[in-house]
């Protein structure tokens, strides 16, 4: 897999996570507790975050990406 494609995948996940976080804030301010849209948006955010972590762990385990330390 191309390095730029891997970077694009991670950035896409981060954008979706931020989008759902913003949607949760918007729904919290607009709905005033009348619907479950806030909970659904924040649930999707948590699911995307866990999914991104699992994808990164799998990619490291399979050798598709190699982690590096700062200043190593």
Image (spheres, helix red, strand yellow):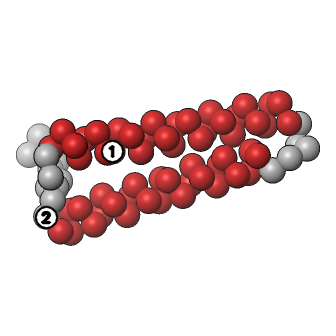
Q: Which mark is residue 68?
A: none
Q: Position of residue 12 (x, y in %)?
A: 39, 40
Answer with left or right where residue 71 lies relative to residue 60: left
Answer with left or right where residue 8 lies relative to residue 71: right
Q: Nearer the viewer, residue 29 or 68?
A: 29
Answer with left or right where residue 42 lies relative to residue 5: right
Q: Quadrant of residue 57?
A: bottom left
Q: Which mark is residue 63?
A: 2
Q: Residue at (15%, 52%) from the top-left corner?
A: 1
Q: Residue at (38%, 58%) from the top-left corner?
A: 53
Q: Residue at (22%, 43%) from the top-left corner?
A: 5
User: Label 1: how many residues lie within 10 Å, few (<14), some (14-19) or many (20+)?
Assistant: some
Q: Residue furthest left?
A: 72
Q: Quadrant of residue 70?
A: top left
Q: Nearer the viewer, residue 60 or 37?
A: 37
Q: Earlier in the sequence, mark 1 or mark 2?
A: 1
Answer with left or right where residue 29 lies relative to residue 23: right
Q: Position of residue 50 (x, y in %)?
A: 47, 59
Mark 1, residue position:
10
């Amino acid at each position: 897999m191309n390095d730029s494609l891997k970077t694009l995948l991670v950035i896409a996940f981060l954008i979706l996570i931020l989008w759902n976080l913003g949607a949760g804030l918007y729904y919290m301010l607009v709905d005033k507790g009348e619907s479950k849209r806030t909970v659904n948006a924040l649930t999707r955010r948590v699911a995307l975050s866990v999914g991104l972590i699992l994808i990164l762990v799998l990619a490291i385990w399979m050798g598709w990406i190699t982690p590096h330390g700062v200043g190593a």
